Image (cartoon, rainbow, N blue to C red):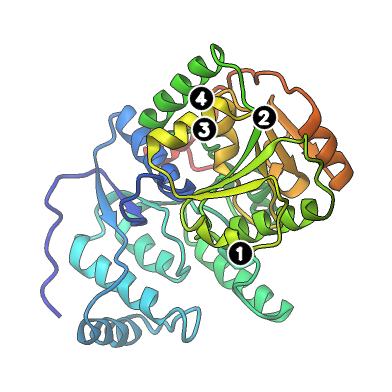
């Protein structure tokens, strides 16, 4: 393997950044990454961004896979699905991180391979994990309860090699603390550019009469989002009154919803340019979100509230946002239909959790170790 090259910019911290690709409608994962990067910059923390590799030539992957196994005695946490991630993580470390353990901190967001934590911990004074969700508990990743428990044990093993873990939701932080992990919450708040765009939508909504429409917006590349949208449309399809709001399905890869069982008053618009999407958000009565139980949190909920859009959500979708003004929760089809008929007030403007953000920064700087 080629001799490791030094990062091109001086850094006191390294941000292990997932590469989500360019999109006019970036999903919640990309916005979460931007939020963390902006927090580091706002507090004067110089950092080098380490883009997570998604592919490499097969000879290079094979060398990295064998090299990691021989050098560390590790095997992939998942087989065969985890082979590529196992190799790419090692290749990233070899090529982008200094070989001497003098790195002040690594902010580790790309936590798909938990065994990578042990390698990063040896190279840095502080390793701070910021998982976008508890990966092992995402439905559909494994086929049996026994496999889920084994995957969870592996993920916890990775977190035990960290200085601290900052989750996106309070209940995940609580669960990790119950299992002996130093964990706190770093709540999601939209990055600067998106916040400005959402506040402009809020301003225009206050001067605009809303249409009799409800928006089902989200990336259908995310299985929980796609399945949840399909489920709520099927729930409403048998008995949806003609005078109820028209349902508009919008988002990346959402065109397939045109083939689903859905109410007659439902249009599938698919992916739209930013300008058209913002126009819909200005006119819509509410955002409807339905989701099955999963980990992480639905970031577009606070984004909608920031834009002044009321949110109608089932219990699992609303998890983590119970105290936020503008969230209207339903438990069955009757409650959902009632909410769709009701006028909903403009939500209060949500605020950033400055204390939680400062605690995260203090851990990155070594001022707090979350005892």
Looking at the rendered image, the disc whose residue lies closer to the viewer, 1 or 3, is 1
Q: Examine the rendered structure and indicate whether residue 109 appears above or below residue 320.
A: below
Crowd around label 1: few <14 · some 14–19 · many ≥20 (10 Å): few
The first of marks 2 and 4 along the sequence is 2
Residue at 26% x, 49% y is: 49
Q: Is residue 187 left or right of residue 326?
A: left
At a point 55% along the width and 22% down the height, the residue shown is 351
What residue sits right under mark 4 in the picture?
354
Q: CA distance from mark 2 to mark 4?
A: 37 Å
Residue at 77% x, 54% y is 237
Q: Which mark is residue 280?
A: 3
State the image coordinates of residue 48 (x, y, percent, origin top left): 23, 48
Q: Earlier in the sequence, mark 4 or mark 3?
A: 3
Label 3, secondary structure: give it.
Answer: helix
First in sequence: mark 1 vs mark 2 = 2
Tell me the element at label 4.
helix
Point out which mark residue 212 bears: 2
Helix, strand or loop at disc 1? Answer: helix
Whether residue 158 is situated above or below residue 70 in the rendered picture:
above
Seen in the picture, residue 122 relative to 199 is either above or below; the reply is below
User: Would you say 56 lies left or right of 8 here?
Assistant: right
Q: Which quadrant of the view contains residue 226?
A: bottom right
The residues tagged by marks 1 and 2 sit, at their Cα atoms, a distance apart of 24 Å
Residue on which the image places disc 1: 259
Q: Nearer the viewer, mark 2 or mark 4?
A: 2
């Amino acid at each position: 393997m080629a001799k490791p090259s030094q990062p091109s910019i001086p850094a006191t911290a390294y941000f292990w950044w997932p590469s989500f690709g360019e999109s006019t409608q970036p999903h919640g994962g990309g916005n979460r990454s931007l939020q963390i990067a902006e927090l580091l910059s706002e507090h004067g923390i110089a950092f080098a961004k380490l883009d997570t590799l998604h592919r490499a030539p097969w000879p290079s992957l094979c060398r990295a896979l064998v090299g990691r196994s021989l050098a560390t005695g590790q095997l992939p946490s998942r087989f065969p699905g985890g082979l590529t991630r196992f190799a790419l993580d090692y290749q990233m470390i070899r090529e982008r991180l200094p070989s001497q353990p003098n790195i002040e901190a690594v902010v580790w967001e790309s936590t798909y391979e938990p065994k990578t934590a042990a390698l990063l911990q040896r190279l840095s004074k502080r390793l701070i994990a910021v998982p976008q969700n508890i990966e092992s508990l995402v439905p559909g990743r494994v086929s049996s309860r026994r496999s889920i428990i084994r995957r969870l044990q592996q993920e916890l093993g990775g977190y035990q090699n960290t200085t601290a873990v900052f989750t996106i939701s309070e209940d995940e932080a609580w669960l990790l603390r119950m299992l002996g992990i130093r964990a706190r919450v770093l709540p999601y708040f939209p990055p600067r550019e998106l916040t400005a765009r959402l506040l402009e939508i809020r301003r225009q909504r206050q001067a605009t009469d809303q249409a009799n429409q409800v928006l089902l917006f989200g990336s259908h590349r995310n299985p929980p989002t796609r399945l949840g949208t399909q489920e709520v449309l099927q729930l409403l399809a048998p008995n949806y009154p003609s005078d109820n709001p028209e349902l508009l399905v919008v988002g990346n890869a959402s065109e397939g919803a045109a083939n689903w069982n859905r109410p007659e008053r439902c249009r599938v618009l698919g992916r739209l340019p930013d300008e058209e999407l913002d126009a819909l958000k200005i006119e819509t009565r509410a955002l409807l979100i339905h989701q099955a139980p999963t980990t992480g949190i639905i970031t577009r909920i606070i984004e909608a509230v920031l834009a002044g859009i009321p949110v109608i959500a089932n219990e699992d979708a609303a998890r983590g946002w119970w105290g936020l003004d503008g969230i209207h929760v339903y438990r069955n089809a009757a409650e959902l239909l009632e909410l769709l008929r009701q006028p909903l007030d403009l939500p209060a403007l949500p605020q950033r959790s400055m204390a939680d953000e400062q605690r995260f920064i203090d851990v990155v700087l070594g001022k707090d170790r979350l005892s």
